[in-house]
Image (cartoon, helix red, strand yellow):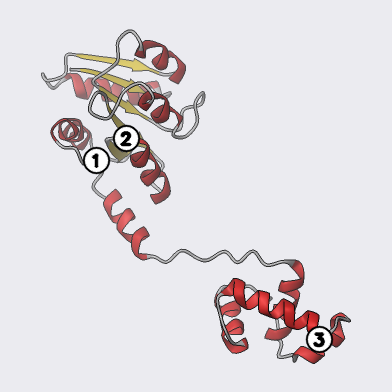
């Protein structure tokens, strides 16, 4: 089995290679410290397994996965991401793009060997031990909504949270009552509420107004 290691940190790559070649299953292990050098080798000698960092200086992020998958499907070349980046979005993006496994660089060398063997006999991706916990937490934590309020809507919201009435706000902003009501309807629609008290509570909950009211 031919394994390619793509990592711009030579010391880490050498350590990975020494570990992998200690297993008789792996006959050839090559190190690449530049993504472009590895991609040039694909047409001549594609690896059975690619172990790659996704923070390479010459091809950023998930680019290496995308380029590999343009030529080789998941069953033809296994891709194992080994990275310091362990945020849920990055993990899910890599798996969606075609990575067979994702491990943190804090994983043990024993787990890496296990992951390599795992992806050859299982179709589902392998996730490092504590990365599963990160994804579970991300699934159950409700993301903070983005409301994209205009400057005028923010101004109106601030005034409401101060306890001002619509008439008082219209007077202070030198706008007609109809204009203020129009802004208020749009504001409620954006924040998905039906009543002014709900609007105020939501604004406070998500820190949309100045705390010094």
User: Whole-percent x and y of residue 186?
Assistant: 67, 74
User: Whole-percent x and y of residue 85?
Assistant: 41, 42
Determine whether the residue tagged by mark 3 lies in a helix, strand or loop. Answer: helix
Q: Which residue is mark 1?
A: 125
Q: Nearer the viewer, residue 142 or 96?
A: 96
The residue that appears at 63% across and 73% down in the rendered structure is: 208
Q: Earlier in the sequence, mark 3 or mark 2?
A: 2
Q: Nearer the viewer, residue 139 or 134?
A: 139
**Pointer 1: residues within 10 angstroms few (<14), some, or many (20+)?**
some
Q: Which residue is mark 2?
A: 99
Q: Which quadrant is the N terminus positioned in?
A: top left
Asked whether, in this view, residue 95 is left or right of residue 48, the answer is: right
* Residue furthest right in the image: 174
* Residue furthest left in the image: 24
Labels 1 and 2 touching (C-beta < 8 A): yes
Marks 3 and 2, how far apart at CA: 57 Å
The correct choice, above or below, for 156 with respect to 74 in the image is below
**Pointer 3: residues within 10 angstroms few (<14), some, or many (20+)?**
some
Residue 150 in view here: yes
The correct choice, above or below, for 88 with respect to 102 in the image is below
Which image quadrant is residue 107 in? Answer: top left
Q: Which residue is mark 3?
A: 177
């Amino acid at each position: 089995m031919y394994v390619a290691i793509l990592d711009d940190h030579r010391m880490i790559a050498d350590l990975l290679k020494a570990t992998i070649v200690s297993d008789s299953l792996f006959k050839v292990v090559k190190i690449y410290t530049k993504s472009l050098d590895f991609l040039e080798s694909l047409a001549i000698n594609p690896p059975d397994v690619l172990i790659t960092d996704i923070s390479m200086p010459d091809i950023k992020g998930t680019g290496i996965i995308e380029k590999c998958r343009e030529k080789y499907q998941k069953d033809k070349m296994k891709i194992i991401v080994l990275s310091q980046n362990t945020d849920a979005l990055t993990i899910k993006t890599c798996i969606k793009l075609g990575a067979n496994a994702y491990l943190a660089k804090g994983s043990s060398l024993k787990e890496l060997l296990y992951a390599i063997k795992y992806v050859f006999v299982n179709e589902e991706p392998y996730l490092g031990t504590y990365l599963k916990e990160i994804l579970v937490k991300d699934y159950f934590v409700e993301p903070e909504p983005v409301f994209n309020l205009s400057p005028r809507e923010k101004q109106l919201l601030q005034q409401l949270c101060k306890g001002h009435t619509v008439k008082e706000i219209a007077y202070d902003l030198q706008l007609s009552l109809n204009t203020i009501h129009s802004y208020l309807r749009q504001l409620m629609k954006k924040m998905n509420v039906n009543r002014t008290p709900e609007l105020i509570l939501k604004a406070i909950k998500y820190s949309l107004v100045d705390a010094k009211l």
